[in-house]
Image (cartoon, rainbow, N blue to C red):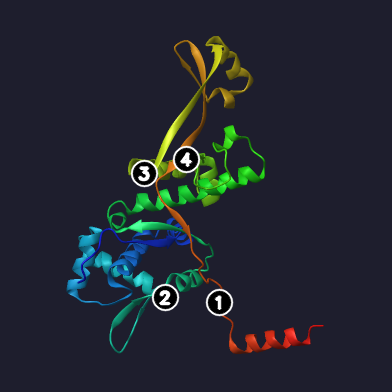
Amino acid sequence: MPTIANHISMTVPIAMIRYFIINRKLPELQLFLTMKYTTGGHFKLNKESRNWICNILRWKSDKTFRKHLKWLINHRLVTVNSKTSNYRIVRYDLAMRRLKLVGKKSARINYQDLGIRFKAFCYGSVITYYSRYKYFLDCKKGSSVRKTGHTSKHDDGPYLILPNASLAHFMGIDIATASRYRSVARKAHYIEVYDDLVCLNLPASFLTEEQERCPKLASRMRVLNGKIYIQMPSQIVPCISLVNKNYKCERPKTGWERRLAVKLSNSSP
């Protein structure tokens, strides 16, 4: 098998990461990316290659490899040449087309991210993407600098805001699951999270009154050294690089569709 250059990175579309997370198929994506990263897109499956890939992914059973590879073949993300028995990993634009996905943002992934840290990498990638996406939404709404954590409209600012409720909304998951995603990504250092406590300069007795008036707001308050502090949204510093890629996700037109388009363009006034 080929020698792997650990310093070489490749990209993976955020739309694909989100799809495999939601459908609970991250091992399949892990296998897809590992074969794409290490084989150059084509390989011949034998016992040596299976053991080599299983060793990279820390899979103890050859049965696990076959199970996930079968899923990729059934969804046409990996094709098999019946004559030569060679396997081919399809390119990203074709894979996204077959999964009915769209999107330009991609995350850079290294060889070290393909092992036991792969799940944390995927969580960190979607958190990075949606934290920047929410930031741009806040800019369009004219949110304050205090709320967005930026003074610039570029996406390379140091601090981003993404509450667990917002991540849950974007991903279509519950808040507890979103909190777990952030905890896993934070533990693996794919994101840095800084909690923000603001002193209100109010006596501790005010908290009791506030619990009766507005329990939801009071739940964000803490008493430290006799003063009340309020928990503001945590600030996130992404450690994953995102890039734009022009994937041709739309289905290519057939011959009659192209001829029809030409006729329509010629007949238009």
Amino acid type for the residue under numbered disc 2: Arg
Amino acid type for the residue under numbered disc 1: Arg
Nearer-N-terminus badge (2/4): 2
Nearer-N-terminus badge (1/3): 3
Viewer-side residue, 30 vs 241:
241
The reply to whether the C-beta atoms of the residues labelled 2 and 4 are less than 8 Å apart is no
Q: Is residue 140 left or right of residue 201?
A: right
Q: Residue 13, relative to residue 174: is it above or below? A: below
- Crowding at dot 3, Cα within 10 Å, few <14 / some 14-19 / many 20+, comes out as some
The image's mark for residue 158 is: 4
- CA gap between label 2 and label 4 equals 40 Å
The image's mark for residue 184 is: 3
- CA gap between label 2 and label 3 equals 31 Å
Q: Secondary structure at mark 3?
A: helix
Say which residue appears at 63% left-offset and 89% top-offset.
Answer: 256
Amino acid type for the residue under numbered disc 4: Pro
Return the residue at label 1. 251
Disc 4 or disc 3, which is closer to the eye? 4
Disc 2 or disc 1, which is closer to the eye? 1
Q: Is residue 193 left or right of residue 262?
A: left
Disc 2 or disc 4, which is closer to the eye? 4
- CA gap between label 4 and label 1 equals 38 Å
Can residue 239 be seen here? The reply is yes
Nearer-N-terminus badge (4/1): 4
Can residue 172 be seen here? The reply is no
